[in-house]
Image (cartoon, helix red, strand yellow):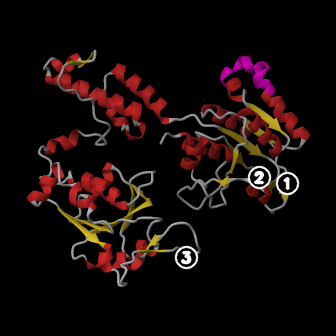
Amino acid sequence: MIFNVCTIFPGIFKHLFSKGVLSKALEKGVISLNPVDLREFCEDKHEKTDDYQYGGGVGLVMKPEPIHRCVSSLAERGRVILLDPVGERFTQRAAERLSGYPALTFICGRYEGVDERVRELAADEAISVGDFILTGGEFAAAMIIDAVARLLPGVLGDSESLSEESFCGGLEYPHYTRPSEYMGLGVPEVLLGGNAAEIARWRENESLKRTAAYRADLFPAELVKKADENLKSALYNATRAAKGRKLKVALALMHYPMRDKQGDTVCSSITNMDLHDISRTAATFGAERFFVVTPIASQAAIAERVVSHWLKGWGSTYNSNRSEAFAKTEICASLGEAIACAEEIWGEKPFIAATSAKETGNISCRVLGNLAEKKPVLLLFGTGWGFHPSVLELADFILEPICGVGDFNHLSVRSAAALILERMTRAG
């Protein structure tokens, strides 16, 4: 397999793979590494590969001509990959997919990145190795080359080891070597007993427990069938615990100012179903408060009566779960009052994030969830036919809309609240 690397620093790769498993694969000709200097494809005497941005801004951008010429010059370029933050996240599955190509070509950006036209003219796909910043794409290319090359026949000494690795159905079990005891810590007795069947069972169970505890997103539910009954319960609890994260988030269900079907500004009615279901959703996902916003005194009185019934009335003894759900539900006369209450709770003003089925949005649930781990966020949910523009203007963010599989776009606010909070609180 050929690995081409289009870079302004080809010398980086001279020593990078000079040791270890890949160095032997290079010697045997199982893989071939071809770093190509982008400066060789410049047509000016200074061999300039970057320039200032159109529209202004800090940092230089790599020019499209040298990159396009470089890629076009390669006789065996195979799949051309642009290393870029907007690309698909690189995973073990992606490594397995890429290992099927006869050649891979990597475009390594620097500075502020590459000219956008490179994506269209030279790249087959874009890949990101993670949510962090590197000084250059060369290091990302090296990671991918290492991950892909070791999957090729003849690279590893023991090909069977590939089937027992982390990310091949979960995280790998713990490993131990000599001495049998070190600093008061010993090796599990089962590994010292020599019973192959018991060792295999222990490793399988430890792999399941480790995956459930640390990387629940990788956890394949069908593997629970392999575990004994005691472990099944532990795995279930560990998986549930690992999937969620506590956020600094509160909800506000807005009833004014809203739009009606004709586009007029109205105050919508509070519904019993919204009160119950969103209170339960907020409690389930650990929201700090659920604010119900209406300026109409009679509507607020109805809501207060419902909440009071479940907190103090007969409902509190009839259904304690519902009482718990309503414990953090508050009625507010305005959005300003809700924001002030949230600021008093957290000691700082929250970011305002509006939800809308009509707007394109400027932040994802995952990114907003990451923000809410550190800073408070007040999520605004609308009723009627959507927010008055003044609400959207007040918001710091507009959350990406929830997209279904067809053209129907009328999800209930209760369902939307649950989906958004689940996506935000999901770990990772």
Work out whether 245 lies above or below 86.
above
Q: Residue furthest front?
A: 46
Q: Which mark is residue 54?
A: 3
Q: Are marks 2 and 1 in contact (CB under 8 Å)?
A: yes
Between 127 and 160, the residue placed more toward the observer is 127
**What range of the chain is rendered magenta?**
308-321
Spatial CA distance of label 3 from label 1 is: 45 Å
The residue pinned by badge 2 equals 384
Q: Amino acid at mark 1?
A: Val
Work out whether 31 lies above or below 43.
above
Q: Residue 272's quadrant in the figure?
A: top right
- Residue at the location (78% across, 36% down)? 341
Q: Residue furthest left?
A: 28
Q: Is residue 396 left or right of residue 66?
A: right
* Disc with the residue nearer the chain's start (3 vs 1): 3
Label 1 sits on a secondary structure element that is: strand
